Image (cartoon, rainbow, N blue to C red):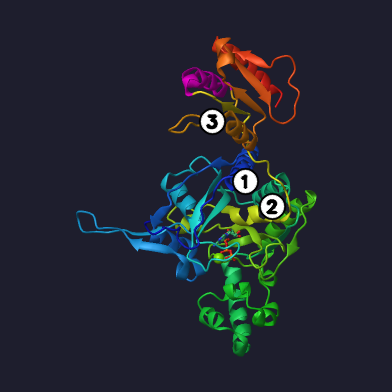
């Protein structure tokens, strides 16, 4: 036998029946986004490397070490593109919004779902291909939209039956305010230089704010005693933050202030937030976001504010599992038993009519040597989870009928048998089946 091939490390197949949980989540998200009037955007998975270097920031985990980048083959003119598989989708959304001038008539509310790629060490809740669902509101400056996005996420948790989360918020203020804080932060960190780990020392002058985000317990005290950004914010930034909090309070969305919450991407200002759970170990952040009022301009667009979040689908699904929420797995309404291959033509016509009427039917598939025994077909019918078996036996077909046998102990009233011709009668019966579903 040939050597078996496997999926790439850190990249998972999503198989049935588990994929049904993914679809269930995606359906809920689509419905909810519609209720908040967010519209779907789909951008390419490959982008120019420069997009992420510029958009996410050179001194970030993602750009420093996590991107899947490669040189594309040269075109006829000998030039080649440097491409990267998107590690996140906000930069691409902004690129698309600028490229297509989507803000020409005012703000836009957008959402996306899809795979992202980061070359991280695979572990529970951390993969190299993972999936995000994100919502972005571009062109809106007020804290009302920050709040709307957080309320949308909270509504999603409710819709998914998740209650084991907490919301952490912080404000990063504006660049000038951050610059003042930065100087004092660096001084503080330098004073405790001996306690900094290697990464912190490296970031001390390039991106000191990120040091506050450290997961190294040995640095806990240093970062907790560090000067707080919030103390450097002016009245406008503070008013924005208060505006957000007032709306969250009015909607009974509990929040906690986390002074160390700074987010791993460089483009944020003012509001930042994370939804965190304690039930997933170290990978406890299920959703994260914030305001990025300077990114659009940085990407060559006319200056416009923006705010958004992204949730990790794998982590959210894991939390749903962890909480024991059961997701109904799909089963066919009916399983078609065909004792003899001679019945294929007429059975297939009846099944087409049923499916066209919205009934889901799994057909017993034949083998090279025929259809298999009735016993084995009934076994399969039972295992399929279907409510009914439809039996296309010779006796029934001779009368132009199909036998209907309930498989889950239900009593079917009146009809045990349905006429096949005209096919509309099958369709009518199918409507009854759906209505009683
Ligand atoms: P972390 O601190 O866990 O690395 P991050 O700050 O890099 O997260 P974001 O870029 O903000 O994450 O992405 C938003 C969400 O996407 C995260 O909160 C998380 O739920 C999910 N996520 C990020 N990276 C991964 C990954 N490698 N595997 C699975 N989910 C991920
Ligand atoms: Mg990360």
Q: CA distance from mark 2 to mark 1?
A: 10 Å
Q: Residues within 10 Å of mark 2 (few under 14, many from 20)?
A: many
Indicate whether 72 appears above or below 414. Answer: below
Indicate whether 282 appears above or below 297. Answer: below
305 relative position to 144: left or right: left
In this figure, which residue is indicated by the disc labeled 2?
A: 320
Question: Is ligand 1 within 8 Å of the beta carbon of the residue shown at mark 3?
Answer: no
Give the label, 2 or 3, closer to the camera.
Answer: 3
- SS state under label 2: helix
In this figure, which residue is indicated by the disc labeled 3?
A: 364
Residue 410 picture location, percent across and down: 75, 27
Residue 302 visible somewhere in the drawing:
no
Give the label, 1 or 3, closer to the camera.
Answer: 3
Which stretch did the figure color magenta? 341-357
Q: Residues within 10 Å of mark 3 (few under 14, many from 20)?
A: some
Q: State the residue at coordinates (71%, 46%).
A: 326
Residue 122 visible somewhere in the drawing:
yes
Label 2–label 1 contact, CB within 8 A: yes
Q: Quadrant of ligand 1?
A: bottom right
- SS state under label 1: helix
In this figure, which residue is indicated by the disc labeled 1?
A: 21
How many labels were placed on the picture? 3
């Amino acid at each position: 036998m040939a050597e078996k091939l496997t999926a790439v490390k850190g990249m998972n197949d999503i198989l049935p029946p588990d994929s049904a949980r993914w679809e269930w989540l995606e359906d809920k998200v689509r419905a909810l986004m519609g209720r908040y009037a967010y519209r779907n955007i789909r951008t390419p998975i490959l982008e120019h490397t420069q997009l992420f270097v510029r958009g996410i920031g050179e001194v970030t985990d993602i750009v420093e070490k996590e991107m899947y980048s490669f040189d594309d083959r040269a075109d006829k003119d000998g030039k080649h593109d440097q491409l990267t598989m998107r590690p996140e989708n906000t930069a691409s959304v902004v690129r698309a919004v600028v490229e297509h001038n989507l803000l020409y008539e005012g703000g836009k509310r957008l959402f996306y779902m899809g795979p992202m790629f980061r070359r991280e060490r695979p572990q529970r809740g951390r993969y190299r291909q993972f999936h995000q669902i994100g919502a972005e509101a571009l062109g809106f400056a007020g804290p009302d939209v920050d709040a709307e996005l957080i309320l949308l996420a909270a509504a999603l948790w409710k819709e998914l039956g998740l209650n084991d989360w907490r919301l952490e918020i912080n404000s990063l203020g504006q660049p000038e305010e951050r610059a003042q804080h930065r100087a004092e932060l660096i001084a503080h960190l330098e004073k405790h230089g001996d306690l900094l780990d290697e990464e912190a020392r490296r970031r001390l002058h390039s991106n000191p704010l990120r040091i506050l985000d450290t997961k190294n317990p040995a640095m806990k005290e240093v970062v907790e005693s560090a000067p707080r950004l919030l103390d450097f914010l002016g009245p406008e930034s503070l008013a924005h933050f208060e505006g957000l909090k007032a709306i969250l309070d009015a909607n009974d969305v509990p929040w906690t202030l986390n002074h160390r919450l700074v987010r791993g991407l460089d483009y944020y200002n003012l509001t930042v937030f994370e939804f965190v759970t304690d039930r997933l170990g170290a990978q406890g952040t299920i959703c994260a976001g914030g305001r990025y009022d300077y990114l659009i301009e940085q990407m060559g667009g006319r200056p416009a504010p923006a705010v958004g979040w992204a949730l990790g689908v794998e982590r959210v699904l894991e939390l749903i599992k962890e909480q024991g929420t059961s997701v109904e797995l799909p089963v066919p309404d009916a399983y078609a038993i065909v004792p003899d291959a001679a019945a294929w033509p007429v059975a297939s016509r009846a099944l087409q009519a049923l499916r066209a009427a919205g009934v889901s039917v799994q057909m017993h598939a034949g083998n090279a040597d025929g259809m298999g025994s009735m016993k084995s077909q009934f076994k399969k019918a039972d295992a399929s989870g279907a409510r009914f078996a439809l039996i296309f036996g010779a006796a029934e077909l001779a009368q132009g009928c199909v036998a209907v046998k309930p498989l889950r102990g239900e009593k079917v009233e009146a009809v045990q048998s349905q006429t096949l011709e005209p096919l509309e009668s099958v369709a009518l019966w199918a409507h009854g089946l759906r209505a009683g579903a």
